[in-house]
Amino acid sequence: MSFVNIHDRLPEGFYDAGRDRPFMPLSHYEQNFDLYSREVILVDRRKDEGLDALTLAAQTMVYNWKTLIGSRQGVDDTADVNLQVASLLALFVSFRYGCSDRSSLIQRARKGVSGSNYSNPFVCTCSTGSGEYLMGYAKQNLDMIEDTAFPDICENSFRNMKARINSCIIPIGALQFGLCRHRAILMKYLSDRMDPPVPWELVRGYLDFCPHAWNVVLVKRRGTWVRIVVDACRPHDIREEADPEYFSRYTPLNRIVTPTAVSNTAFAGLFSSILSGEEIEKAAPGSVVLCKFGSVEVAAKVRKLEVCGASWDKVRQFEYNCLAG
């Protein structure tokens, strides 16, 4: 699962096992993966009291905010409201998955308290790339040490929870800490359950060459729909997807992987000329060819990998090398 568009509502019982695993019935993950493997994220409010509490808290928060804004302005600008709700939910999810206690949250939600103290949310890098890269980066930037240590805190928390419930399947509402994948899924889930639902996408790809997940909200500006990147790991920095810095840093998978059948899809024509042209197939690895990137002509360096029989680690390393090179 690498992309969930605005028209797809995350259903109860949705689960995510990671981009590197084949999709199969939930019970099969329990049978085939041990407690040391990457967790399977389960989203099911019917069986998850923590998720139910989070949903109620988020709905109450947004309802109270809309009531306050409506009483002051008396104008309902849907596009502006969607962006503001996206910002509120990003702060809400960031705070909840950084330093909150699930049991106390459930109690507060049951009493109808929204928990609106978002002045200092926990902001993490959620980096999942090379550990050596992270440590080197932290040594160069001392103020980032706390951020780069956060993934280790999360992974330890996941391991403890899997051992406690004796399962690799973790309900998303039971998490005390959350990385980008947990935050992006929860953001999409909550946005689908707002009244009215917020047009959000769940996106997977790379941030600064490291695997990452984030959300995109659609906002209408000057008669045109604009895609806005909302990252719950960086809730204070919301920008347009076309922003030069964000466009170069956030790389969705659908920007570098062409679907098998592109002729009748919205992706046709953007990257198909790069990945499926005959000149690419015939070119030697390491050579540079001229091709089209949308309407722009670019030079592309050819790299090839025989994926049949290749391990996931080898495929992943190949992707990293392509992005970094």
Image (tube, helix red, strand yellow):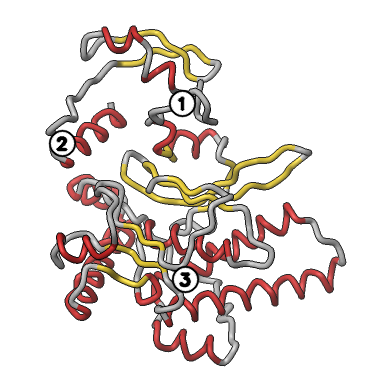
Label 1, secondary structure: give it: loop
Q: Earlier in the sequence, mark 3 or mark 2?
A: 3
Residue 24: quadrant of the picture: bottom left
Q: Pointer 1: what residue?
A: 262
Q: Position of residue 245 (x, y in %)?
A: 50, 37
Label 2, secondary structure: give it: helix
Residue mark closest to the camera, 1 vs 3: 1
Distance in Å between CA atoms under marks 3 and 2: 36 Å
Distance in Å between CA atoms under marks 1 and 3: 40 Å
Dots 3, 2 in contact, CB < 8 A? no
Q: Position of residue 176 (x, y in %)?
A: 35, 75
Tell me if mark 1 has few (under 14), some (14-19) or many (20+) residues whose alpha carbon lies within 10 angstroms of its own: some
Residue drawn where x is 46% and y is 64% of the image: 186
Vertical relation: 281 (above or below) 150: above
Q: Pointer 3: what residue?
A: 95
* 267 horizontally vs 219: left or right: left
Q: Nearer the viewer, residue 59 or 89?
A: 59
